[in-house]
Image (spheres, helix red, strand yellow):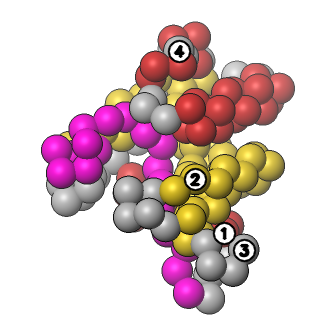
Amino acid sequence: MEGRHRKVQVVLAAIAPSGEWSFLIFKTNKDRGQFWQNVTGSVEEGETFEEAALREAKEESALNIESIIELQDLGLTTTFQDRWKRKVEEHSYLIVCEEQWKPTIDPSEHEDWKWILISSLKSDCVEWPSNYDAIERAAKLVRRMGA
């Protein structure tokens, strides 16, 4: 892990008013490429991957920590080279929340957000295959939880 930039991606899940599971995704702003993705972010010095997942989810979506039902490591680690040519190790997490909420987004990172119903998931709902892999793995887990 030494020499690698550490990152997390977080799949945020909640039951929609229709009673179906849904996932919250964000559209990056123009400077960041204008693509849809899960919550992502860097792990800060002295922080665990899990701590970073919680912090990033709160920062990027205005998640109320008290509404979390479950936080689970998805067991999915992706390695890649980022746009700054750094070697990156990214761990993926699922955060299950009591209900959907309206996120407050930071315009320096994102320009839009939406909840996607589990029945509407397609591989092109997010830009990167690793984001979709995390959503698929999260979908399998929440299906087992029932609605």
Q: Is residue 98 above or below residue 51?
A: above
Given residues 17 and 29, the one toward you in this image is: 29
Is residue 64 magenta-colored?
no
Look at mark 2 in the image and give the residue it sits on: 80
Residue 33: which quarter of the image?
Answer: top left
Could you tell me which quadrant the C terminus lies in?
top right
Given residues 106 and 66, the one toward you in this image is: 106
Look at mark 3 in the image and give the residue it sits on: 1
* Residue range of the region highlighted in magenta in the rendering: 28-45
First in sequence: mark 3 vs mark 1: 3
Within-10-Å neighbours for mark 1: few <14, some 14–19, many 20+: many
Spatial CA span between label 3 and label 4: 32 Å
First in sequence: mark 3 vs mark 2: 3
Identify the residue shown where x is 78% and y is 32%: 141
Q: Is residue 4 above or below residue 12?
A: below
Spatial CA span between label 4 and label 1: 27 Å
Identify the residue shown where x is 73% and y is 32%: 137
Look at mark 4 in the image and give the residue it sits on: 122
Q: Is residue 3 above or below residue 39?
A: below
Residue 105 horizontal/vertical position (percent): 27, 52
Q: Amino acid at mark 4?
A: Lys
First in sequence: mark 1 vs mark 2: 1
Given residues 130 and 140, the one toward you in this image is: 130
Residue 72 shows in the view: no
Residue 49: numbered disc = 1
Q: Amino acid at mark 1?
A: Phe
Identify the residue shown where x is 54% and y is 19%: 123
Which label lies toward us, 2 or 4?
2
First in sequence: mark 4 vs mark 1: 1
